[in-house]
Amino acid sequence: MLGINRLKERDIYENYFEKVYKTTFYILKNEELAKDATHDTFIKVFKNLGKMKDQTKINAWITTIASRTAIDIYNKNKKLITYELKEEHAHISDEFNYTKDELESYLKSIPPEQKQVLILKYIEDLPEKEIAKQLSIKLGTVKSRIHRAKQKLFDLYQLGGDSDVQE
């Protein structure tokens, strides 16, 4: 039985590694911290795999753990994080379209809690009620974070962006 669990863990790791890394990198904007957050995320996932009730929501569950882990690391390392996007990191967003790539450059100016709800809503396509449930926060809090984040993105765009970021 242990072999089956290890195989399942290996499959989960292989299937979700890139998504977890991208999620943590979106929040942390630092390669080393994102690697640490990714590692910590999978430790938490494997420790709590037996507690997961609805296997169909594993994608959202893992993404939520990844974003919470990244926010914890962000808060611990606020002074150490650099928000520069370097050319060497361009490969991270290869699968995303041009609009999302441009949006990523604005995300560095948004607080991690707002970034987290945007990722869950617009990248993971979760409804706001599900986001509230996953993050254990009120629906109104989710809506206000989304609104504030969108407003900040729009303001950044108005200050000189050249993308199609819209409210």
Image (cartoon, rainbow, N blue to C red):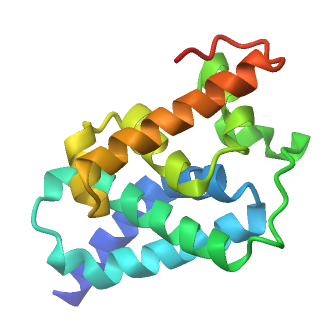
16 vs 138, nearest the viewer: 138
Vertical side of 124 occupied by 166: above or below: above
Vertical side of 143 occupied by 48: above or below: below
Image x and y of residue 63, in percent: 40, 56
Judged left or right of residue 90, residue 15 is left
Residue at 16% in and 51% down: 56
Residue at 21% in and 56% down: 133
Image x and y of residue 125, in percent: 33, 33
How many labels were placed on the picture?
A: 0
Residue at 82% in and 52% down: 83
Residue at 31% in and 52% down: 60
81 vs 40, nearest the viewer: 81
The image quadrant of residue 134 is: bottom left
Image x and y of residue 68, in percent: 46, 66
Residue at the extreme bottom of the image, as rendered: 2
Image x and y of residue 51, in percent: 16, 78
10 vs 20, nearest the viewer: 20
Residue 102 visible in rendering:
no
Judged left or right of residue 5, residue 113 is right
The image quadrant of residue 122 is: top left
Residue at the extreme left of the image, as rendered: 53
Vertical side of 19 occupied by 100: above or below: above
The image quadrant of residue 54 is: bottom left
Judged left or right of residue 29, residue 56 is left
